[in-house]
Amino acid sequence: MTEELNERNLIGFLKTLIRYFASGFIFIIVYEYLHGGTKIWEFTADNVNWSIVVMATISGLLIYAIHQSFLDDIFYFISLLYLRTFRIKYWPEKEKNIRKVMFLLSTYRYSRPGKTNEEIKSTHERLDWLLTILTFLYTTSYSLIILPLVFSENANTRNVLLAGIFILTCGIFLDVKLTRRELFMLQQETTANSQ
């Protein structure tokens, strides 16, 4: 029991770190790399630059907040538009409005943790981990795309920009994959409730 609690605490800590703070540290690293700074590379156990840690934390929270405020909905919409266009079989019957489907899926996503069914709970934990990775991919790509545009005179900007575009593309593919899975789960739930 104690091992399970420790494992859950560790997983919860990692999810929090990845979701809220990792993108800020990526932002600071990319900024220092493109700006030619060396402060970030001088970190040791004895020499922690707390101002950089605080800036990275604030940057991560801001990037996450901006992503959740509206960018996440844009990518979610793109995923659903792609899936509707290619007429996957899990699309809700008679529903053409993508915004309504987004609302249904978001509501279902928020209600999943409260379900008592063990299968749904374990599926939710797996999906939540994948959604954390998805958030990391999106929030990381923003720094890798925007900062090279700001530091366009730097010789390394092209490589960083290409890495950002690649990571953003990976995020979009994962978003489509997860959205498709959630549409399937919603269909299963709707079918089970109607019987």
Image: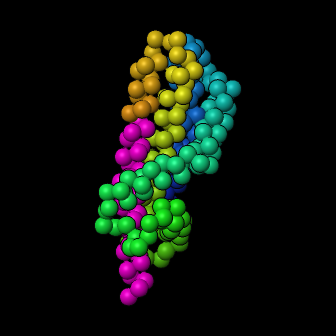
155 versus 23 height, above or below:
above
Total count of labels: 0
Residue at 46% across, 57% down: 128
Residue at 55% across, 17% down: 151
Q: Nearer the viewer, residue 163 or 10?
A: 163
Q: Position of residue 39 (x, y in %)?
A: 60, 17
Residue at 50% across, 12% down: 154
Q: Quadrant of the C terminus?
A: bottom left
The image quadrant of residue 17 is top right
Q: Position of residue 71 (x, y in %)?
A: 55, 45
Query: Is 171 covered by the magenta stretch?
Result: yes
143 versus 93 height, above or below:
above
Residue found farthest to the bottom: 195
Residue 29 visible in the picture: no
Residue 39 visible in the picture: yes
- Magenta highlight range: 167-195
| Dominant SS in magenta | helix
Residue at 44% across, 61% down: 125
The image quadrant of residue 126 is bottom left
Q: Nearer the viewer, residue 85 or 25?
A: 85
Q: Nearer the viewer, residue 86 or 8?
A: 86
Q: Nearer the viewer, residue 11 or 32?
A: 32
Q: Position of residue 92 (x, y in %)?
A: 40, 70
